[in-house]
Amino acid sequence: MGFLKGKNQFDVDGRTVLITGGSQGMGRGLAKLLAQKGANVVIVARNEQKLAEALKYIASSAKDPSNQRFHSISADVTKPEENTRIITEVTEWNHGNPPDIVWANAGSAHPSLFIETPLETLRSQMDINYWAATYLAHATLKVWLKPTSGKTNTTEAAKPRHFLITSSVACFAGLTGYSPYSVAKSALRSLADNLRQEINLYNGYRKGHPSKGPSADVKIHCVCPGTILSPGFEHEEQIKHPATKILEEGDPRQTEDEVASAAVKALEKGEYLVTTQFLGHAMKAGMMGGSPRSSPLIETLLTWAASVFWLFEGPKMDRKIFEYGQKNEVKLPE
């Protein structure tokens, strides 16, 4: 049945990929998988020791070790100037060419009840989960969308560049204990929706003005994984409120390799809004809004099913939280 297989919409072989949050968890899983598919990979994180260890691990998975290249950058992605530096450094390392694919994957969760969360933590959650990706998108797109300097662009079949944002299934539903995190991830989904449509302006200009437009089309993607078994998850479990754990009972969990594989498989099919397991698919179906459907018929049916599901599950979840408060001590503000 191989002849029925569609064209790979996310071919990374020989291309340069930049991944923030690449030293552990989903980022490391993505970098390893894309190395196996032939990409030149640059990972970004703060801890230099973790970066060195991850880079060695990733490089060992290279499809073509003699030709592929790997690099790491230590940076604080919550600062706008650092994101500009990252793009500049990768461009220099990549022989004067900007990265072909940029994945804004850096992030962390601090699950806690809203009034028990210090204001500085609420702000830092926005910094790492929203602003880091926004700064990187701004720095990347300002480079990618530069004009071709008067040279007629005859590369109609040039491979598009991809900018990817890692959000979370938390953007699809409100969950007790996730307000510091899910608000930022919801903002990322909204940013991706806006950029996906806005980028058509530049892709259209390139089509109509080949001598002045950008050198390649740009595609935007939003990836929304669920629970990932990682060092970050282990930390979350230590600080998570018991009521939050009740809501998450039975939720599917994925390893870094499983979530990377599911995400890339969907991207190769050309999907824009990507979920990585069935619960995520169902949650997405109920919150599609104006986002494009990858499978219109299936996702329309899932949207109907999700509406029926939430008719019962929403009140059930609310009742669990109410009953927890009814039966247990709850810390009140002083």
Image: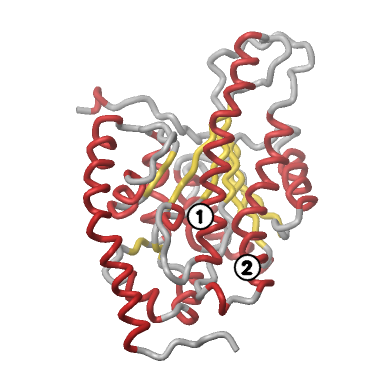
Residue at image location 41% in from the left, 91% down from the top: 329
Quarter of the picture holding the C terminus: bottom right
- The secondary structure type at the circle numbered 1 is loop
As drawn, is 323 to the left or to the right of 122?
A: left
Query: Hey, which quadrant is residue 305 in on the image?
Result: top left
Quarter of the picture holding the N terminus: top left
Q: Amino acid at mark 1?
A: Ser
Residue at image location 50% in from the left, 47% down from the top: 62
Q: Reply above or below: 291 against 177.
A: above
Q: Residue 14 placed where, x, y %?
A: 55, 34
Q: Reply above or below: 11 against 274.
A: above
User: Disc 1 or 2, which lies upstream in sequence?
Assistant: 1
Residue 324, visible in the rendered structure: yes
Residue at image location 51% in from the left, 75% down from the top: 112
User: Who is closer to the viewer here, 96 or 219?
Assistant: 219
Q: Residue 136 placed where, x, y %?
A: 68, 46
Query: Hey, which quadrant is residue 184 in on the image?
Result: bottom right
* Residue extending furthest toward the left: 1
As drawn, is 290 to the left or to the right of 207?
A: left
Query: Hey, which quadrant is residue 243 in on the image?
Result: bottom left
Q: Which residue is mark 2?
A: 122
Mark 1–mark 2 distance (CA, rounded to whole Å): 38 Å
Q: Residue 188 placed where, x, y %?
A: 56, 48
User: Who is closer to the viewer here, 15 or 116?
Assistant: 116
Q: Which residue is mark 1?
A: 60
Q: Reply above or below: 4 against 300.
A: above
The circle on residue 142 is none
Q: Amino acid at mark 2?
A: Leu
